[in-house]
Image (spheres, rainbow, N blue to C red):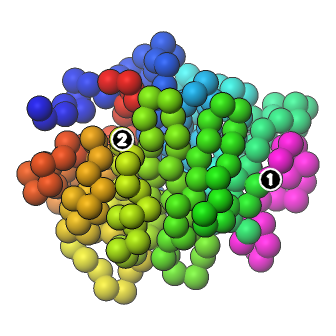
Amino acid sequence: MRYNHRAGASLAPTDCNHLSSYIKFLGTAGTRFVVTKQIRASGGIWLFLNGVHLHLDPGPGALVKSIQSHLNPQDLSAIILSHRHLDHSNDVNIMIEAMTNGGTLRKGTLFCPQDALDRNPIVFEYIRHYIENIEILQEGVRYKIGELEFDVPVKNIHGSVQTYGMRFFSSEGTIGYVGDTRFFDGLINAYQGVKVLIINTTAENKMPDRYHMCVEEAITLIKGVSPELAILTHFGTSMINAHPDVMAEKISEATGINTVAGMDGMVYSISS
């Protein structure tokens, strides 16, 4: 049965409040051109799993999109950066301020690669004192936020920056977020067993000199992992021009796996 994202997953912003678990896309933009022109929004992904709110990759506009979606940053228990590039991290400081009520409520955990804190840090020194913990992401390590656990199954290949995907072990199914990376065979083993696989599919066609995945590589990954549902996001210019919905249909036909193109504001209920 074809998964219909318009009927099943695209809800009004307030509709997610009654769901026991969900993934909300506060943006689906990828690459500097789509982000800087705001052809798609770039606010990252808000997840509510096992009673835990977390914000993944808060890019430009993350705070604005959260508020517009009636999501309260003070509900957050954690903010996660897959890597330091601006389209994934631009709003990390203001989201920490919002999560901690301007630093008056010391709470929450920031999960990020080491290089987000070291050379030319993207997380300001004074902001770090607002949060309870900073956890450094490392390949093969399992982490816990309240009742939710996640791990970093493999280190991505994304130029010179430290970049990681994650598997979130929800009671309603495991969610895999691949993140930005060049395709490599280790990704298939890393995401075995996930219910939902979120893939940053930036390009329509392969770009040998780029560290992002294309449609054909997404097909290979989805075939190898065989999730119940694949969600495409992080679209670059070529994907926008090719129409993400059309590319998702192409992938569905090639893999036999329900594949949908993420949309700004889309909500997916894990239990659906």
Under tag 1, what secondary structure?
strand
Q: Is residue 263 something that shows in the picture?
A: yes
The stretch in magenta equals 115-134
Disc number placed over residue 134 in the picture, else none: 1
Q: Kindly give the residue lying farthest to the bottom in the view shown.
A: 209
The answer to whether 112 is drawn above or below residue 245 in the figure is below
Of the pair 69 and 132, the residue shown nearer to us: 132
The answer to the question of whether label 1 and label 2 lie on touching residues, with beta carbons closer than 8 A, is no
Measuring 41% from the left and 72% from the top, which residue is drawn there? 186
- Residue type beneath disc 2: Lys
Mark 1 or mark 2: name the one nearer the start of the chain. Answer: 1
Instruction: Give the residue at mark 2.
Output: 195
Left or right of 108 on screen, residue 145? left
Q: Quadrant of the C terminus?
A: top left
Q: Position of residue 41 (x, y in %)?
A: 44, 47
Vertical placement of residue 130 versus 1, above or below:
below
Q: Is residue 201 left or right of residue 101?
A: left
Quick one: label 2, few (<14), some, or many (20+) residues within 10 Å? many
The image quadrant where one finds the N terminus is top left
Tag 1: amino acid: Ile
